[in-house]
Amino acid sequence: MDSIHAIRQARIDAMVAFIQLKPSDTVADIGSGNGYNIVRLSKYYPGVKYHVEDIDSTSCNRKNFQKAISIYNPAIALSDFTFTYGTTTSTHLPKQYFTKVLMIAVVHEFDDKALMFADIKSILKAGGDIYIEEPFVLKPTAKKDKGCNNPYLTEEQFKDIITANGLTIAEEKNTANSGAQYRKIFRCRIGRESVVVNRESAIVNKLIDK
Ligand SMILES: C[S@@+](CC[C@H](N)C(=O)[O-])C[C@H]1O[C@@H](n2cnc3c(N)ncnc32)[C@H](O)[C@@H]1O
């Protein structure tokens, strides 16, 4: 029991070290579920408020969040979480509004990945970051995740989805490892890094030319 607790805490610690949230950030958590992870994370970012979003109001609701708050972070108020309900194709969140968008164990669950990623890019402010933590299997599988209709992804399948949807991975780190399955967290940005690098080197070259 203790070791499971330690493994879960080590995963949260790895995520906290990776995700930088400040009270000045506007934060959305897509597919928040019953709040288990976002409430645990909130303990480490005092003063931050969250827009939590899901398609399932039977899991993502004030009662379940209050329960998670009383267990994992009694210092945060329920009113620090704003609830929004989306669909399988749209978050229904405001456009160009968020400086940080989080997705924890959600990407494999998206039934329409193209429309969800298009929507998620549209709610991000220019220069904002998308943090994705996702469980991975070692080999492609058709076996469905217990909690949803879709199978877990391999890391390669995930990276193909990210690239196909116009995002680039700026940073990545392991958060947990349990043999047949492991988890990683990614910081993603809109666009392709090589374009940004080329643009920067073009500017540098221009400056050198002068
Ligand atoms: C495995 S749970 C993860 C919950 C939460 N992020 C956590 O880590 O505790 C996945 C959640 O994604 C939600 N979900 C699935 N498809 C979605 C979509 N298109 N938009 C928003 N949420 C979605 C599900 O309803 C479910 O609550």
Image (spheres, rainbow, N blue to C red):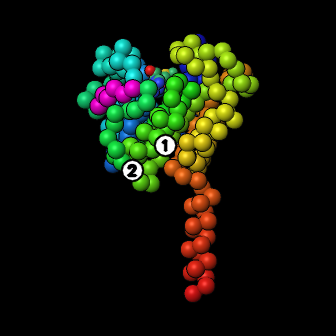
Q: Identify the magenta region.
A: 82-87
Q: Nearer the viewer, residue 98 or 69?
A: 98
Q: Which mark is residue 125?
A: 2
Seen in the picture, residue 45 relative to 196 is either above or below; the reply is above
Q: Amino acid at mark 2?
A: Lys
- The residue positioned 61% from the left and 82% from the top of the image is 208
- The residue positioned 63% from the left and 58% from the top of the image is 194
In the picture of the structure, the residue carrying the numbered disc 1 is: 130
- The residue positioned 61% from the left and 27% from the top of the image is 135
Q: Amino acid at mark 1?
A: Ile
Q: In which quarter of the view is residue 14 placed?
A: top right
| Distance between mark 1 and mark 2 Cα atoms | 11 Å
In the rendered view, does 62 fall on the left or right side of 27? left
Residue 101 spot, x, y in % from top left: 43, 40
Q: Which mark is residue 17?
A: none
Q: Dominant secondary structure of the magenta stretch?
A: strand
- Of labels 1 and 2, earlier in sequence is 2
In the rendered view, does 59 fall on the left or right side of 10? left
Residue 184 spot, x, y in % from top left: 61, 34
Label 1 CA crowd tier, 10 Å (few <14, some 14–19, many 20+): many
